[in-house]
Image (tube, rainbow, N blue to C red):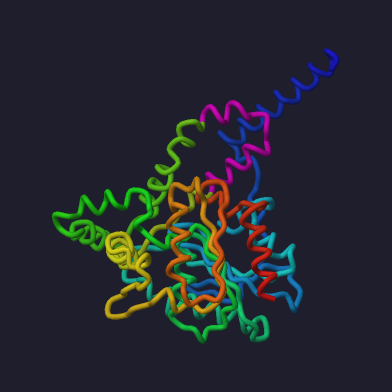
């Protein structure tokens, strides 16, 4: 490279660095999110249903099921990190159920609201929109658990398959849970339960702090990362996408989180195969459709072993597959070469 080319490249990088520094500090950010175009089919509190635009009339339906305490746009972060766009590109008709914000007024909502009402309603609406054809469910994190429990609770629902990415199916394998149990031996977890009930749930602010704590190394290195990549607009845009995701995390309703705390974390109902919700029991073995499980060996939120445990409990399914993908808890959801490839093959096998 000639001296003139070197000087020219340095000048361009300097201009780009200055522009990116301004955008991150004082401007509106590096890049707009560019959400995939969609149409609202049903608009009601905690159950907004969207259909992403562009699918053919005979395309099979895929309902994307987000977890609580995560924004629904986790499936559509940016054009190159959008599972929704990938599904469109591979000939499917993706839909999304969005729970919206969770507030103190929602403190009495529990697992039953999702398993018996919100998700079954969404599944039936999606099926009706596709002419009565069955629906493939794709859930991430607790969304995968909710999808499986919904399929187990009502086998008459028009569900063709369930994919659960990073879904905790045994809390015995979850990082830190054994230590939490040890701390509750004095009162059986009553203090934490009472505190959550009094607060009406886990606030969005607390959820965001907890999520950032799991990625403390990223937060610690953030200033150096920005400085090192100030001339790399694409890299900074991806960082900004993760920041936008973290800053949008909602909270948990009080009753839902207390069920998660008592029945899942302390008692490990999901790992034992039967979830107790009051006098109600839902057996994971009652899932009778094919299931794809994807775990992440580097996932510090849901250990891969917690996902793989589903191979032991999903005994009623005719086909249970377990695959692994690299990356963080969110990273395995956006892993094109692994998770998306597994999903594409799994859905093709259901046709």
> Residue 278's x, y, as percent?
28, 77
Can you name the residue that lies furthest to the left here? 186
The front one of 144 and 324 is 324
Q: Is residue 244 left or right of residue 300?
A: right
- Magenta highlight on residue 235: yes
Residue 80 on image: x %, y %:
68, 50
Looking at the image, which is closer to me, 198 or 27?
198
**Image: magenta residue range:** 223-244
Q: Residue furthest top?
A: 3
Instruction: Give the left or right position of residue 131, taking residue 316 as reference.
Output: right
Q: Which quadrant of the figure has residue 133? A: bottom right
Q: Quadrant where the C terminus lies? A: bottom right
Q: Main structural element of the magenta stretch: helix, strand or loop?
A: helix
Give residue 139's position: percent from left, percent from top: 53, 65
Quadrant in which the N terminus is drawn? top right
In the rendered image of this protein, does residue 42 appear above or below residue 255? below
Tally the numbered discs: 0
- Whole-percent x, y for residue 103 in the image: 37, 63
Look at 64% across and 71% down and name the residue there: 51
The answer to which of 19 and 262 lies nearer the viewer is 262
Relative vertical location of residue 305 with respect to residue 38 in this rendering, above or below: above
The residue at the point 52 percent across, 47 percent down is 328
Q: Answer yes or no: is residue 254 visible.
A: yes
Which of 194 and 297 lies nearest the eye of the viewer? 297
């Amino acid at each position: 490279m000639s001296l003139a080319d070197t000087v020219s490249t340095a000048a361009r990088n300097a201009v780009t660095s200055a522009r990116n520094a301004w955008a991150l500090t004082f401007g509106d950010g590096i890049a707009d999110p560019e959400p995939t175009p969609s149409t609202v089919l049903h608009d009601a509190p905690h159950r907004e249903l969207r259909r992403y635009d562009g699918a053919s009339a005979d395309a099979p339906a895929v309902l994307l099921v987000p977890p609580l305490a995560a924004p629904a746009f986790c499936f559509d972060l940016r054009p190159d990190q959008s599972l929704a766009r990938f599904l469109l590109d591979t000939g499917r008709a993706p839909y999304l159920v969005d729970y919206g914000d969770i507030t103190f007024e929602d403190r009495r909502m529990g697992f039953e609201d999702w398993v018996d009402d919100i998700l079954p309603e969404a599944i039936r609406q999606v099926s009706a929109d596709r002419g009565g054809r069955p629906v493939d469910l794709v859930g991430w994190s607790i969304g995968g658990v909710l999808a499986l429990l919904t399929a187990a609770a009502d086998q008459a629902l028009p569900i063709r398959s369930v994919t659960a990415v990073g879904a905790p199916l045994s809390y015995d394998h979850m990082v830190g849970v054994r230590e939490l149990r040890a701390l509750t031996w004095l009162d059986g977890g009553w203090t934490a339960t009472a505190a959550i009930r009094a607060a009406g749930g886990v606030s969005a602010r607390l959820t965001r702090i907890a999520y950032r704590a799991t990625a403390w190394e990223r937060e610690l290195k953030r200033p150096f990362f920005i400085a090192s990549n100030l001339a790399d607009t694409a890299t900074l845009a991806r960082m900004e996408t993760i920041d936008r995701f973290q800053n949008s995390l909602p909270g948990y309703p009080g009753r839902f989180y207390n069920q998660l705390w008592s029945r899942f974390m302390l008692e490990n109902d999901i790992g034992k195969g039967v979830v107790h919700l009051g006098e109600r029991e839902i057996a994971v073995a009652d899932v009778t459709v094919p299931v794809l499980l994807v775990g992440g060996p580097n996932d510090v939120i849901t250990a891969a072993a917690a996902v793989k445990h589903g191979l032991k409990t999903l005994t009623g399914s005719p086909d249970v597959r377990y695959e692994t993908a690299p990356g963080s808890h969110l990273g395995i959801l956006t892993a094109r070469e692994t998770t998306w490839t597994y999903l594409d093959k799994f859905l093709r096998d259901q046709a």
